[in-house]
Amino acid sequence: MASKRVKEGSIPKRRKIGIRSAVAPSDANLAKIRGIIAKGKDSSPSGVPDSFKILLNELRALGLNVELLKGPLRTPEVESPSLSRTAQSRTRLVAGKLAYLKERLGGVGHVAEAVHADKSRVSRWVKGAGPDEKNFRALSDLEFVLSRLSRIFDDATADKWLVSRNAFLHDQRPIDILNQGRVVDVLSAADQEEAGSYS
């Protein structure tokens, strides 16, 4: 069998084998796709962070049936008279987020700086006084973005990336964009950064 020569600089034609080849979306389309994923087609209750919506959709893409529960969560623990079950669950959730962020960022002061809150306010959250909805969302978004960045960078590089001006974000700092609730933009910038490191 004689092999065909391919001219230098030309791209050889693909043979059809019955399966369509996947084409990676462009950077502009990737940001649109992330926006669609964040918004989703289901009607999530208000107050659900975009990062959680993205996580839900990623789990669903893996074939896991994930549904948001309506009403109070049922736990096997004895209910405290001063707290409802939902409040107890949220308190435990906040405690877990704060424990991770304190360890990951190096203390309450750094957590406060990252979510643009007073150190004394974050200290009260650590002691059990729950954050308001805006700050709860900020903690959730920060936790989600840090966990995603850990797939791309080591901890020191991720910390520096968060507070440095970023060309993909029009020379704004990712941490500032994150505190505006624009999780999708920060994740898109991280993806573009990762794509650039492999090209």
Image (cartoon, grey):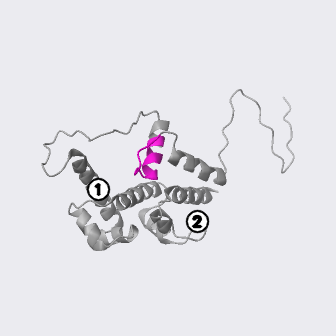
At horizontal 68% and vertical 36% (from top left) the residue drawn is 21
Of mark 1 and mark 2, the one earlier in the sequence is 1
Name the residue that disc number 2 marks: 169
At horizontal 29% and vertical 67% (from top left) the residue drawn is 122
The residue segment tinted magenta is 43-57
Residue 153 position, x and y percent, is: 48, 60
In the figure, is residue 4 to the left or right of 163? right
Amino acid found under the numbered disc labelled 1: Val
Classify 117 as above or below 97. below
Name the residue that disc number 1 marks: 94
Q: Which corner quadrant holds the N terminus?
A: top right
At horizontal 12% and vertical 49% (from top left) the residue drawn is 81
Q: Nearer the viewer, residue 151 or 61?
A: 61
At horizontal 68% and vertical 29% (from top left) the residue drawn is 19
For disc 2, the neighbor class at 10 Å (few under 14, some 14 to 19, many from 20) is some
Q: CA distance from mark 1 to mark 2?
A: 29 Å
Q: Is there CB contact under 8 Å for labels 1 and 2?
A: no
For disc 1, the neighbor class at 10 Å (few under 14, some 14 to 19, many from 20) is many
